[in-house]
Structures are given as structure tokens and as C-alpha cells.
Image (cartoon, helix red, strand yellow):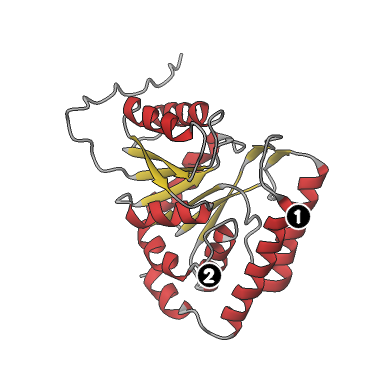
Amino acid sequence: MRTARRPAPPLDPGLPRPEPVLEVVVPVHNEEHDLEPCVRRLHAHLAETFPYPFRITVADNASTDRTPWIAARLAGELPGTRWVRLEEKGRGRALHTVWSRSPAPVLAYLDVDLSTDLAALLPLVAPLISGHSDLAIGTRLARGSRVVRGPKREIISRCYNGLLRGTLSVGFTDAQCGFKAVRREVAERLLPLVEDREWFFDTELLVIAERAGLRIHEVPVDWVDDPDSRVDLLPTALADLRGMARLGRALAGGRLPLTALGSAGTA
């Protein structure tokens, strides 16, 4: 009979921890209810299944509720967990800030609602650890994915990704799933080229990477819609359309160093 793998005992807080191989960022804004169960579940999952040192970073985007207090307490209790405070909102801003300063070879992020099943986390980052791929994304629109969400969000998501294919000729299937990872040396070259600091950040990063010929690995995920999602759909959609237009002009005008980026990423 096969026994379940037990998590390693916590390290003595007085001893230095090894540098993380993986850093997972959880961007949050006023998430006092979801933050603690998310981080505890993520920490337990990584301790149980991930075979290398890891770090969880809660990136607090100008929260005005108890989120900073909860994040600080979790950082004090859970080995390999920390939090950073940003005084401006923006998921892209949080990811840009933390990823730019991380020592980990592989950088990832996931949404605090944990809509994506954590069983997909190791398949997401394994090709990056091995060097097989440069970026990896969870996709809800590929064969093998199992998705539970309302018709409104399903239509919006498919229209958005269809618009991307029609306007920017992308090959990846799901730009919006909050479940992505990138190799650090690739991020170091991509992040200075990504202008958006909010919701379009993911799409811009992926489009530039794909145009540069970097290798994007897709992982089908099980995903359950969060009915309490606070994303304001209309302003976000308008900002995304403006982002597509801006990025399309930059690509058409040859203002992005794609050749150099692709050569550096595959060296």
C-alpha cells in the first residue's frame, strides 16, 4: 500500500533558508476573507508535492482592509512565506515588482481565489525548471480542461481570446487565466518591454514573448469560477482594447527588439 508523502518539518527560523527554486506570487487587494485559506492551502500543497525549495510572496496592492495584517501574520508563521506592500493598485504592477527582484530561477503567480486546481502547478513549472520552455500558462480553453463558470464569463473569455487571435495573430489559447510562470532570465528581458501595470499585463507579456519566438507551454487546467470576483468587466475590457491597439502599433512600427529578445531567450 502506497503511503502519502509527508511534508518536510518546518525549518528552524534561526537557520538560513536555501534560495528558492520557485517563487509564487499571490497579488491581492482587499482580500481579508480569501487570503489566509489561499496561502495556507498553497503552502501545504507545495510542502507536500514540490521537491525543491519554494517561496510564497503575498503582494498587497494598496489594501485598505485587514489584508496587510493577515499577510504579515502568515509570513511570520509559515516558513518560506513573505509579503510586500505596494502603495498603488495593479496586478501587473505587483508582478513586475516582485518578479524583478526575485532570486528564484522560476517565477509564477496565481489568483487568490484559487479558481485553478493546484494539481496543475507542478505540470506548469516543471518544463521551466527543466529548460524545455520559457513561459508556461494555464489554459481553460484547451482539450482536457474542465471549467465551471457562467455563460456570461464564458462568452467574454472566448470573445477576448478570439479578438487576440484576430488582431494580434496569437497562437496561445488563454491569455486571461490567472495561472502563469516564466523563467527568471526570460522575465529579466521581457519585463522592461511590458508597459501595462494592470490587467493587460499578462496579455502583453505573452504576445511579446510569442512574437520573439520564445517557447510557451500550455497546461489544461480544472477551473471553477469565483462568484465573488470583483473584476469590473466593462472598464477592464475597455482597458484591454486600448492595450491591444497600443501593442499592435508598437509591433507594426517595429519598436520592440524582438529579434534580440528571441536570440537571448533561446541561447
Q: How far apart are the two marked residues, 1 and 2, measured between alpha carbons?
A: 21 Å
Q: What element carries label 2?
A: helix
- The residue at which mark 2 appears reads as 208
Relative placement, left or right, of 207 versus 83 is right
Relative placement, left or right, of 105 versus 145 is left
Which is more N-terminal, label 2 or label 1? 1
Residue at 57%, 35% (x, y): give it: 114
Label 1 Cα crowd, 10 Å radius (few <14 / some 14-19 / many 20+): some
Residue at 81%, 46% (x, y): give it: 152
Which amino acid type corresponds to the residue marked 2 in the rendered image? Ile
Q: Is mark 1 on a helix, strand or loop?
A: helix
Quadrant hosting residue 187 = bottom left
Residue 233 location (% of width, % of height): 72, 51
Above or below, 125 relative to 34: below
Quadrant hosting residue 145 = top right
Residue 232 location (% of width, % of height): 69, 49
